[in-house]
Image (tube, rainbow, N blue to C red):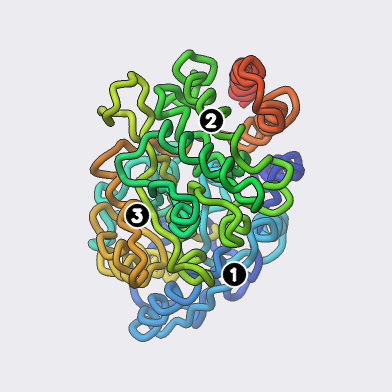
Amino acid sequence: MKLKKLAALILALAMVLSLAACGGSSSGGTTTGDSSTASGSDGYTTSSLTVNIWDTNQQAGLQEIADEWTETSGVSVNINVVDWDNYWTLLEAGVSGGDMPDVFWMHSNTSQMYMENGVLLNLDDYIAADDDIDLSNYYDGIVELYSSDGSQYAVPKDHDTIALLYNKAIFDEYGIDCPTDDWSWDDVLAAATAITEAGADDGVYGFAMNTSNNQDGWYNLVYGYGGEVITEDHKDTTIDSDEAKAGMEMMRQILEVSVDQTTVAETGTDSLFMSGKVAMITQGSWMVYSFYTAENSADYYWAEIPYCDANGNGTCDDGERVSSYNGLGWTASYNTSDPQAAYDLISWFCNYDNQVKQAELGVTMAGYVGADEAFSTAFGDMDVSAFLKVEEDGTLFFRPYTRNTTVWEDALQQTGAFLDAWLDPSDPDLMSQACDNAATIIRDAIAAE
């Protein structure tokens, strides 16, 4: 049975990613995931829907948008926040026979596994009957991510990009010029080196990177220098190429003058930055609110993600400034008691007007192309336009994934792959060998899928 197969697959990945979601469908109904049940009618059979997400910072804004739908539909919406690990653990429990939320977020790490095993509501007929949703209006990579065998199982909720965050007070204290949108990674290395040396007695470092946070970190250097963690057809990698190794060599040099990875693992880059011990980090647009509401936020500024000056000409050429992007999808349980109501809520979250409102409220950037301009001014005096400018000044690449992303993604963080090079960034040969080992790990994992 498909659900038993999925449960077995998830249990096999338990050491890598805890899987599941809490809450429950409105009445634990038995409606199947066949989208032919779509009625196109507003005559709902439920009075409430349960929605699960994992980000507290987004709860208030999304609840505000949902409450407006409640006013017109008469169906109440309860948005529950479940922390990342427990989110997936509880969702797995729901798949195995417990309650599932009616509507919830889906992520690139797990989407293929859930879509292929009949857990998510097939949205094809609902979308076809919906004048508000045209998938061509959304970011292609996110639409593709949540489709399987020609069917759509989620509508893009948002997208994100990466920028450089810096503490102006630290730069001023040590007399170092602040980052600009024109900085290369070489400029980052030079500034990080200068601050780490000047701040040695104060315990201040120029940079910190959590190497396990690949999307907002080292992935961007691999792609910026011309490599690919996963090729566009999702069947191979070029992480062992000269181009990718050049990107990882820059990463190694930056790590040499950064907070050591043992300390990062214990404390976290965000905490180190907000405690005034780190001058620069890279971070994703989904984290802006945390820094906007921090105690010393007046000192925090954003610049575009640095470019990789691969040809050494001192200018940013096409393809040298890159940012990874990813996007969540709004999806529904295959056994929600009222699939039409669940879909209509998804449609409400994802229509143009509410994608604009999501950006205006600072919930996150939109999944609807061109609907997130207001995000850059959603945080008062904190200018976060760098997250949007990279889409004009640079190139976006979709966060690399395969059918079982977490298998190779976790293995890359272990001994025999990049862990040794992370812990001892003094050896260029160790980093080069790590790239070769990583390529073998990825290719073996893809072959096993």
Secondary element at tag 1: strand
- Quarter holding the C terminus is top right
Whether tag 1 and tag 3 are in contact, CB under 8 A, the answer is no
What residue is rendered at 41% in x and 67% in y? 363
Sequence-first tag of 1 and 2: 1
Q: Which residue is mark 3?
A: 367
Circle 1: is it few (<14), some (14-19), or many (20+) Cα within 10 Å?
some
The vertical placement of 15 against 120, above or below, is above
The vertical placement of 381 against 116, above or below, is below
Choose between 15 and 151: the one closer to the eye. Answer: 15
Choose between 68 and 359: the one closer to the eye. Answer: 359
Q: Which residue is mark 1?
A: 81
Q: Position of residue 224 (x, y in %)?
A: 40, 29
| Residue 251 circle label | 2
Q: CA distance from mark 1 to mark 3?
A: 21 Å
Asked whether residue 25 is in view, the answer is yes
What residue is rendered at 28% in x and 44% in y? 391
Secondary element at tag 3: loop
Left or right? Give the position of 176 relative to 132. Answer: right
What residue is rendered at 42% in x and 34% in y? 185
Sequence-first tag of 3 and 2: 2
* Quarter of the figure with residue 94: bottom right
